[in-house]
Amino acid sequence: MFKTFIVGIVLGVVAIAAALYLIPVVDQSREPSMIVVHPNHGNTESFHVNVPMDRIMIGAKAQANPLPPGLDWPEDTGFDGVRAELFKLRNANEDVVGVASRIAASDEVSGDMIEWVLHLPARGSIYVDLQPEPREGGYRVGALRAGTREFVSLVGQMTERWIADNSGLEDAPAGRIELITAFVAQEITP
Amino acid sequence: MIKHLASLLIGMLVGAAMFLALLYFNPLTHQNTLSPISVSEHDVMTLNYSAVAVDSLVYTNDGESHVDPHPAKVLQLWEAPIRRTTAMATILSDSRDRVAGIGIKFSSDSEKTNLLNGEALVDSVWHIYLPGRGSMLIAQSENYWNYLHDVVIPAYWSSGDNWRGVWNGNITAGPGALFTARVVGGGGEFEGLESDAVESLSAKAYSVEKGPVALRGELAVEIPRDELTVSEDP
């Protein structure tokens, strides 16, 4: 019986070690990447934010209705020209795939700036700074400053555009912020 | 036969407990708390914040964690792809405890988590704006093993369901080879910046019911100095 007990101990050690090795502790839920390949124009991926449903926070001075209710935005004068927002981020299939932050600010050192960070838990993060002045058609264009994990070796651009909803449906959003990324892998020189 | 089966089962339970105890008390998984930034020859900018949810501007998660979202009516991250993600917006202060800017942190449980190696990993990014200075991104992989080992698990073992003491540790575990985070400058004086950072935590109290009660975080960001030019000897 003692031998059986010893065998049991060994089996217990092996079972736990195998379980910890083979069963992932974290398994992030994934949605398929909705990348569109264009003829002669590389590839793009479209994300969007439904406003106001996907808005988590609007941090700005003198907000009549702070979001979320109870937000205590700092009164410090340094934050006068800052607007910081948090969103849920959706893919082209309307599925939530990540979260995003947008900071728009103006000061004497940085000038006017608009930046996005898109965080897709199963894929990585994207850091983009946009040209503050919109182009024809209401697009703002910006370059990918940095990416992590899946995006770490990519270069390219992202566009931002506000699209108002004209469907007239009762539960329709006021509109959407459309973000289109166009990234390619960096050329590797031997 | 039944005696042998019982003996085998008890043996397996003992074996499993022994292995878990070995994992927990394994000194090889205890990470070094010395920050490589602390011996840097460059300037180091420190940004401090409270890592307690109620002290932040906004903190949100899936709504089922023991750390409640703040404020109470904030939108929760309940959808499957973001269920293991938290988002926090907080005020950052400088080394003199003056307001320095705003930081937004996204953290997601990492699929690279490997408890066998003492790695309880979280992938996170900080989006930081410092008025009058500029903006930056800090991307890192964090390891909470030491924090869980020294603070959270003892709180669960405590009869009062809490932990009090002093715990300091670095949580940055990469992607830099020296366990540093990657810093990329955005606008302002940080434009073009490529540097390293280390995030550390200082815990004083933890409650099983509420999560961190007294927890401060610090970001140490290396700011490379401009190259010094040597003038000719007159």
Image (cartoon, helix red, strand yellow):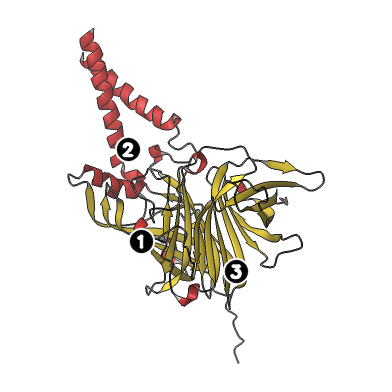
Q: Based on the displayed image, in which of its 4 quarters is residue A3 positioned?
A: top left
Residue at image coords 39%, 72%: B95
Please state the chain letter of the residue tagged with numbered disc 2 in the rendered image.
B
Residue B188's x, y, as percent? Answer: 59, 72
Note whether residue A72 is visible: yes
Which one is closest to the eye, mark 2 or mark 1?
1
Q: For the C terminus of chain B, which image quadrant?
A: bottom right
Please state the chain letter of the residue tagged with numbered disc 3 in the rendered image.
B
Q: Mark 2 to mark 3: distance in Å?
A: 45 Å
Q: Disc 1 marks which amino acid?
A: Asp
Regarding mark 1 in the picture, which secondary structure is present there?
helix
Q: For the N terminus of chain B, which image quadrant?
A: top left
Q: Mark 3 to mark 1: distance in Å?
A: 28 Å
Residue designated by label 1: B55
What residue occupies the far left of the structure in this picture? B159
Side of B172 where B157 appears, left or right: left
Residue at image coords 39%, 51%: B69
Which one is closest to the eye, mark 3 or mark 1?
1
Q: Disc 3 marks which amino acid?
A: Gly
Residue at image coords 48%, 41%: B112
Q: Disc 2 marks which amino acid?
A: Leu
Residue B165's x, y, as percent? Answer: 23, 56
Q: Mark 2 to mark 1: distance in Å?
A: 34 Å
The label on residue B187 is 3
* Mark 2 or mark 1, earlier in chain: 2
Regarding mark 3 in the picture, which secondary structure is present there?
strand
